[in-house]
Amino acid sequence: MIKLKIKSGDTVRVIAGDHKGSEGKVLRVLREKNKAVVEGVNMVSKHTKPSAKNPQGGIVKKEAPIHISNIALVDPKTKETTKVGVRTEGDKNVRFSKKSNQVL
């Protein structure tokens, strides 16, 4: 399993695939599958049976996971996609933007 440089809560932009160009916040990262669930991206229709939680049932729109290689982190300073680096500051490792050199 590789170390992923994207965490939940990050703002990302889709750089490849059907949803190219759309932005959203990472809701969940699936490390085993190298995928992430991004808010409002890769929406799928899921058919649900009636249950106590959803007594009506029917079709529910839901975000599906998207591969990590198809998303890029958005730099908070420049609002452009950027690569992520890791460096040591004091006794902690911090993530930083390679474009603006700003700690994320």
Image: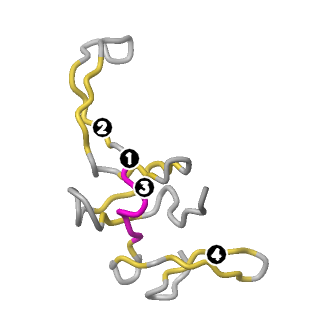
Closer to the chain start, of discs 3 and 4, is 3
Earlier sequence position, callout 2 versus callout 4? 2
Q: What element carries label 1?
A: loop
Q: Residue at x 51, y 76 (%)?
A: 84
Q: Residues within 10 Å of mark 2 (few under 14, many from 20)?
A: some
Judged by depth in the image, the label closer to the viewer, 1 or 3, is 1
Look at label 1 and name its amino acid. Pro
- Between disc 2 and disc 3, whose residue precedes? 3
Q: Is mark 2 on a helix, strand or loop?
A: strand
Instruction: Look at discs 2 and 1 and give the one toward the viewer.
Output: 1
x and y, in percent, of residue 74 in the image: 38, 72
- State yes or no: discs 2 and 3 in contact (Cβ < 8 Å): no
User: Looking at the picture, which amino acid does disc 2 mark?
Assistant: Lys
Of the numbered discs 4 and 1, the one sitting upstream in the chain is 1
Residue in view at x 39 percent, y 69 percent = 72
Q: Where is residue 59 in the image (x, y as percent from the top left)?
A: 21, 25
Residue with the mark numbered 2: 62
Residue 63 at x, y percent in the picture: 32, 43
Image: magenta residue range: 65-73
